[in-house]
Amino acid sequence: MIRWVAVLSIGLSIGPGAVATSARAADPTEIGIGYLGHVGTRATLSLVEQPAENDGVAGARLAIDDNNTTGKFLNQRFTLEERRLKAGEDVAQVAAALAERNGFIIADLPADALLKAADALRERGTLIFNAGAIDERLREADCRANIIHVAPTRSMLADALAQYLVWKQWKRWLLVVGSHDEDKLYADALRRAATRFGAKIVQERTFEDTGGARRTDSGVTLIQRQMPVFTQQAPAYDVLVAADESEVFANYLPYRTWDPRPVAGSAGLEPKSWDAAQDQWGAVQMQNRFIRLNHRRMTALDMQAWTAVRMIGEATSRTSSGDTKKVIDFIKGADFSVAAFKGTRLTLRDWNLQLRQPILLVDGRMVVSVSPQEGFLHQVSELDTLGYDRPESKCKLR
Amino acid sequence: MQAALKRETSRMSRAGLLCGMVVWLAATPAHAFVAYVSNEKGNTVSVIDTESWTVTRTIKVGQRPRGIEFTRDGKFVMVAVGDDDTIQVIDAKTQAIVDTLPSGPDPELFVQDAAGKLLYVANENDNTVTVIDLEKRVRLGDIQVGVEPEGMTVSPDGKILINTSETTNMAHFIDTASRQIVANVLVDARPRFAEFKRDGSELWVSSEIGGTVSIIDPVKHVVTGKITFEIPGLRREAIQPVGIGMTRDGKTAFIALGPANRVAVVDTATRKVTKYLLVGQRVWHMAFTPDEKYLLVTNGVSNDVSVIDVPAQKVIKTIQVGELPWGITIAP
């Protein structure tokens, strides 16, 4: 290890030294990164949480700038090519076209589209970074050897929340689940988390999505009548946990429950990979850089894309190479880690290529806590107390 | 830590300055020094008397005080107040803020040249190192470095300025005469602090997230070794080296390990840890008393300073200071 690093450093120090003297003319190594997203953004209940058009790619752009600042000392240059998938377009074709010019692709796609893209690029050797999809199955039965998962999973998010609620001694949960598929998947993760960490779901309720607009001119009056009624006559509980990824009802619950209880999950105290309020571990510099570049605050998706691009930059600087194969081997290797302002190094789970990471618990204004919580121990890494662990995994990388 | 003057000279010069106006200095006990601690969250600086080991004064400063250093002549204490985008100057006599320096945005750590004429400041927000003329108190220029510059030190011969950049993960070697980068050495993730051996033969750089200290040959610009840490019962991620202190004879190094709540004692010849000293929570920066009998370390989360007896390699005292103590400097 020590010898390897010493040799590497010799290689690296020659480049910049040379830059200062004679070899300024040498062409930089170009590292092309593609960004594959989809057209349109989802509607949220809260107007302030409505995602920007460039949600995600804005983080990738900042990381390209950061990589290029480092790259000027190593004679490496990073480029970003953005492509948005339109409705009806064949994701395999679009991904293949993007891969013509880019050895790495950051993807913000739904699970099925992501798998199609990955399978289309398998022979080509392009590495995909999943920045957007939190589905468990992408890391389990449907895992792929050419997808690195930077986004956390539903189980990681649910476990992070459960650890805090249990630490807080809020162990009796009233679980309210939306009627859409992803709401049910999140509810599955929350039920699993409750069992793992010793919380009890005292009752489950379903909130049916009967349609309707998220913006109305007299919405508050109606919601104020509906929500107390919906939550009345519940068995004694400590916290209402809502599973509503579809943004239908959860944000209507805080301050409106029949019993005065805190809300967590899809509203109130939410588990997230990142938040604009995160200011610990040197994060302020990064938040400032992001605001300066994009004129808005940084979201979890922005951070996931930033981290993906930084992972590539980290690997190209450590290997002193822009060769896709070399870089991919390094990222998947045992020595890889990346710093992402979360107080600890982030590493990959080698059994399914999921990035280990602390999860923030945020209320929209502040970071309330960061999981894993103290006392949840693990023989390998405490970060592996979040989500499916190696012995439980169904993933066979291929 | 970077005491250029011997204690006696310093006391004489201070006595000279005071010009007989004040008598209390003469009564100062033989081995008393003064330590200034920046409290990042409290927006204060705690002044510690090393004879009684008590806080004698708490000075209100600007927002988010971090890097803190005595001027070479011992007359002033400079403290970087990052959220106010400046460095404040405290008069060590009156313990009042008397001036500010044009540091550039969000100054964090800084270092002086041997003469105390130039100040080099790491500005985290715009990837630059700012050079300030300390006498004229004007900004002389900026040097472009990597992403999030942090650790700063100057080689003992004064020819090379070192800056570490936290997201670029490099130690940048800057020629102090030309103010140009002459070499960049890649180290492990999030390099926080750099320190030369007094004879200039080695540069040590701590990597907080990487969990290592790289030892660099400053002539060849290569990493010649790495110090790693293993503490039974502690997971690897909790070991996050930050502050480094080396004794004048170059034989012993002390390395603060952040949330591992320990200071590692390293034999610099074998480059092995010989002892871990349990201190307060999240230990970051440190300073020796000029006689090197004591080493004071700041414990951010437990809001205190631990005093290490250097020859005995033992923690002998804990002193409560302000909120989130960060940096520390001791009068030369």
Image: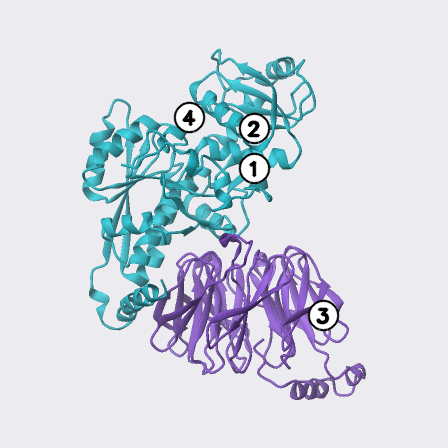
Chain colours: A cyan, B purple
> Can residue A46 be spotted in the picture?
no
State the mark number for residue B225: none
Mark 3 and 4 residues: CB-CB less than 8 Å, in contact?
no
Circle on res. A194: 2
Residue B55 is at least partly visible in this image: yes
Tag 2 near tag 3, CB within 8 Å: no
Q: Comparing marks 2 and 3, which lies closer to the viewer?
A: 2
The residue labelled by disc 3 is B48
| Label 1: chain letter | A
* Crowd class of label 4 (few under 14; some 14 to 19; many from 20; radius 10 Å): few
Question: What number is the disc on residue A362?
Answer: 1
Disc 2 versus disc 4: distance between alpha carbons? 29 Å
x and y percentages locating residue A87 in the rendered image: 28, 23
Which chain is disc 4 placed on?
A
Query: What amino acid is labelled 1 in the image?
Result: Val
Few, some or many residues within 10 Å of mark 1 (<14, 14–19, 20+): many
Kindly give the residue lying farthest to the top in the view shown: A210
Dot 3 alpha-carbon crowd within 10 angstroms: few under 14, some 14 to 19, many 20 or more: many
Q: Secondary structure at mark 1?
A: strand
Position of the C terminus of chain B, as image quadrant, is bottom right
Q: In which image quadrant can residue A391 be found?
A: top left
Q: Distance of mark 3 from mark 4, alpha carbons?
A: 56 Å
Of residues A38 and A185, the one nearer the viewer is: A185
* CA separation in Å, label 1 and label 4: 21 Å
Are discs 3 and 1 less than 8 Å apart at CB?
no
Indicate whether B28 appears above or below A236: below
A34 or B31, nearer to the observer: B31
Pointers 3 and 4 within a single chain: no
- Alpha-carbon distance for marks 2 and 3? 49 Å
Question: What residue type is disc 3 on?
Answer: Ile
State the residue position of label 4: A42
Crowd around label 2: few <14 · some 14–19 · many ≥20 (10 Å): many
